[in-house]
Amino acid sequence: MDDIRIEKAIFEDINSASGIYDAVHDYFSDNVNYCFPNWQKGKYPVRRDAWEAIQENSLFILKHNGKIKGSVIIDNKQHAEYRNIPWGISCDDKEVMVIHTLVVHPSCRQQGLAELLLNYGLDYCRQAGAKTLRLDTHYKNIPARHLYEKCGFHHVIKWSVQIDGVNQEFDVYEYIL
């Protein structure tokens, strides 16, 4: 593949990073037969999410030939309900990392960029001394589920949670490092 780099995002990256969120929202709304990952334009993910992640030093961007084509947030913020999930490993919160908002521009689908971001995340978490990397995805997001399993994540449970008063179902995954 051409020149591909993954690095921590800086504030100058905010427009490109949040622009990918908008492109993904538009792509899913235009492709009604495709499994929408249950994101809502104007609600999540939005520019504010990228901005906060940059402030917290947890947004990573994938550049392909110098242009941002994907991003992922990697931090140790677990959803409160994660405490009720029967994880494969028990460890302190500081030893747990979580992937949020893994996204690749729709024009770059099927090029292996999401897999590169996931593998980068695994390496990053190992270097940070984490014992496990966790994530969840909407149960209808079949391509994401296949990707996680291909990369060695283990399905833990189907998880139901209320978001904005609506019951949502997610598949929860874990990779023990």
Image (cartoon, helix red, strand yellow):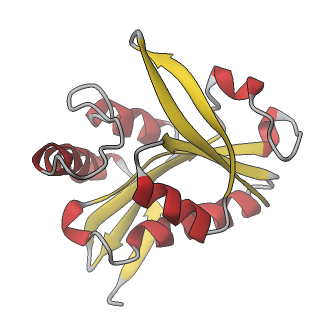
Q: Residue at x 18, y 67 (%)?
A: 107
Decide: is 84 above or below 132.
above
User: Between residues 109 and 12, which one lies in front from this camera angle?
Assistant: 109
Left or right: residue 38 compared with residue 90: left
Residue 95, image x and y in percent?
Answer: 81, 44
User: Between residues 91 and 158, which one lies in front from this camera angle?
Assistant: 158
Decide: is 143 above or below 90.
below
User: Between residues 108 and 67, which one lies in front from this camera angle?
Assistant: 108
Decide: is 38 above or below 161.
below
Spot the residue most to the top.
165
Q: Residue at x 42, y 32 (%)?
A: 52
Snapshot quadrant of residue 47: top left
Snapshot quadrant of residue 41: top left
Residue 56, image x and y in percent?
Answer: 52, 37
Spot the residue most to the bottom.
1
Position of the N terminus, as image quadrant, is bottom left
Left or right: residue 46 compared with residue 22: right
